[in-house]
Amino acid sequence: MDETSQAFINQARTLLTRNYLPRIERCLEQLTDADVWWCDNTESNSIGNLLLHLAGNVRQWIVSGVGGAADVRERDAEFEIDAQALPAGELLRRLCETLAEADEVLARLAPSRLLEACRIQGRDGVTVLEAVFHVVEHFSMHTGQIILLTKIRTGRDLAFYEFNEGVPCEKWHEK
């Protein structure tokens, strides 16, 4: 079981830091600060708000919930900040710092802890496995939204893949 558990932890780290983050970085390279804060309507979120939300979620669930750091998240504030607040570079810096902290927690995470219960968002009994799975799933969903919003704002293909005889080959990690 430890081998499977370690593989789960390793895959979570890979997805967060070497899959989703580079895609977000590729998106931000294509956008102006105005694009990052653009929002179609009051019921939708800007890329800027999504970046703040991702950093808050990762910090609360992994750095705090699993890693034991103080939980200082103010979730509502992630959606109240507007275009005047932070440039894209600062948003990315904050997300990268949070992911680096989370990656350190996951790198030290003993596979035997995956079924351990912790308290996250005021809920007792959240397992470490559930917390890690939640963060990866949540990050994936919002990365997809950021990709879609980038395509809407730029009207361009982000060139994450090239096709060789119909087989997709990743190239999104290349800069």
Image (tube, rainbow, N blue to C red):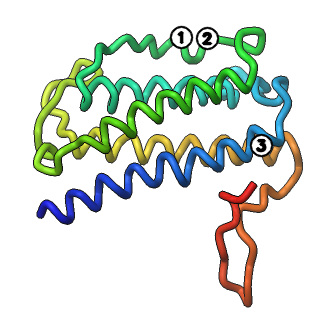
| Amino acid on which the number 3 mark rests in the picture | Thr
Mark 1 surroundings: few (<14), some (14-19) or many (≥20) residues within 10 A: few
N-term-proximal mark, 3 vs 1: 1
Name the quarter where the C terminus is drawn: bottom right
Q: Position of residue 74 (x, y in %)?
A: 44, 11
Which residue was labeled with disc 2?
A: 80
| Amino acid on which the number 1 mark rests in the picture | Ala
Question: Is 87 situated left or right of 156 in this image?
Answer: left
Q: CA distance from mark 3 to mark 1?
A: 23 Å
Q: Which mark is residue 77?
A: 1
| Amino acid on which the number 2 mark rests in the picture | Glu
> Which residue is pictured at 28% across the width and 19% down the height?
69
N-term-proximal mark, 2 vs 3: 2
Q: Which mark is residue 150?
A: 3
Q: Which corner quadrant of the image does residue 62 belong to?
A: top left
Residues at badges 2 and 3 in contact (C-beta under 8 Å)? no
Q: Is 175 situated above or below 166?
A: above
> Which residue is pictured at 76% across the width and 15% down the height?
83
Residues at badges 1 and 2 in contact (C-beta under 8 Å)? yes
Residue that extends furthest to the bottom in the rendered view of this protein: 165
> Which residue is pictured at 15% across the width and 25% down the height?
124
Q: Nearer the viewer, residue 10 or 83?
A: 10
Question: Is 62 situated left or right of 51 in this image?
Answer: left
Q: Is 97 situated above or below 158?
A: above
Q: Nearer the viewer, residue 70 or 124?
A: 70
Question: Is 139 situated left or right of 132 in this image?
Answer: right
Q: CA distance from mark 1 to mark 2?
A: 5 Å
